[in-house]
Amino acid sequence: MKVIYGVAVWLSFPVFVFAQAIDNTQSYKNINTDSYFRIIYENDFFTQADIYYTQGINLELVAQWVRKFPLSKLLIDPGYSYRRYGITVEHDAYTPTNISPTKILYGDRPFTAALFLKTFCIETDPEHKQRFSSTLSTGVLGQAAFGAEMQTGIHHALHDLPPHGWPNQIHNDAVLNYEVGYEKQLVAMPKYFLLDADGKARAGTLSDKAGVGLTAMAGYFDNPFSADIVRRKGARIYAYDHADAFAIGYDATMQGGLFNHTSPYTISASNIQRAVVENRFGFVFNYHKLYVAYFQTFLSSEFKGGADHRWGGIEIAFGL
């Protein structure tokens, strides 16, 4: 109940209507309809922690009219037969291992938050069982993302320890990022099992990285590499596991923005881990227009001296 109440309190802040930590284009997140609205909420509370990537929220809308949105013109079109366009508002917050001290915790992760709009397109080629996605993120990093207000409000509502370190957060800077992703089906047993491989690359002012991954899905589900979007009767239920390995070039949530170098504390480039691994497993239930999922994610240490991190999340989507 605390988690649900916390989400409700967060959503009550009117400034948070505008989300890069959250990946919404992967095949295991596929929703088999032309249009839908989805809420994704991630928090390390689900794994009994309050450090590093402490919270992310994603409000996502997929609809055909988004194709005419001005920023959609900047997305890559490989010419696949089935396209879906969407926009997403995402807010991500990061903290060190202890949020109570007012002093800077050197050698730890800095306080920071990011608030941005994502414009994306997911294209499917059913004949060759492949998917391509492109995403443009535009927004802000720093005080203008209201990370301090968000976490302070939630902790106050939950009667939890207040965070005192936000005055030391990374300062304001621009978020302008571009990401592309490709997925290819490797093995499939219709409706019961799927294995696919993917590659992705991201560049810009917020995050520069590239990676490869594998996804396995098992249960009863509609193939995400199919263009058949008819809402069939009955329930779908499945589990998935997605593993990634990334090469890291730059991360503004630890190193600060590219243009503003006045932040009181950042992690130096020499202390960034250049190779990280991530694994996410989850369970999905889909019935007609309703889609519900729960997942947990593991991420290896992102900086020297840092620890591995885990968090969980929930997704709720409605077909429109």
Image (cartoon, rainbow, N blue to C red):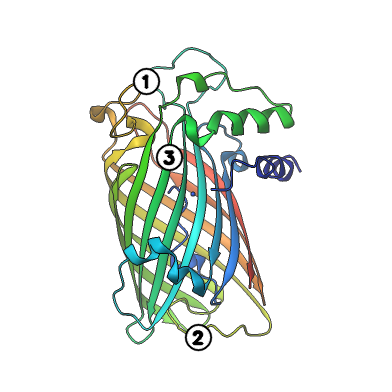
Relative to 228, residue 265 above or below:
above
State how far apart marks 3 and 1 are (Cα): 18 Å
- Disc 1 target residue: 265
SS of the residue at dot 1? loop
User: Marks 2/3: CA distance?
Assistant: 38 Å
Circle 3 SS class: strand
Task: Give whichever of 313, 280 is nearer the camera.
Answer: 313
Indicate the amino acid at tag 1. Tyr
Please tell me whether mark 3 or mark 1 is closer to you in this view.
Answer: 3
First-in-chain label (3 vs 1): 3
The residue drawn where x is 60% and y is 30% is 149
**x, y percent for residue 309:** 47, 38
Mark 2 secondary-structure assignment: loop
Vertical position of residue 82 compared to residue 99: above or below = below
Quarter-of-image position of residue 12: top right
Residue 230 place in picture, x, y as percent:
57, 85
Q: Earlier in the sequence, mark 2 or mark 3?
A: 3
The amino acid sitting under disc 2 is Asp
Q: Which residue is mark 2?
A: 228
Q: Which tag, 2 or 1, sits closer to the chain's start? A: 2
Q: Which residue is mark 3?
A: 140
Quick one: label 1, few (<14), some, or many (20+) residues within 10 Å? many
Q: Is residue 59 left or right of residue 265?
A: right
Q: Quadrant of residue 122?
A: bottom left
Foreground disc of the pair 2, 3: 3
Q: Position of residue 9 (x, y in %)?
A: 71, 40
Q: In which quadrant is the C terminus drawn? A: bottom right
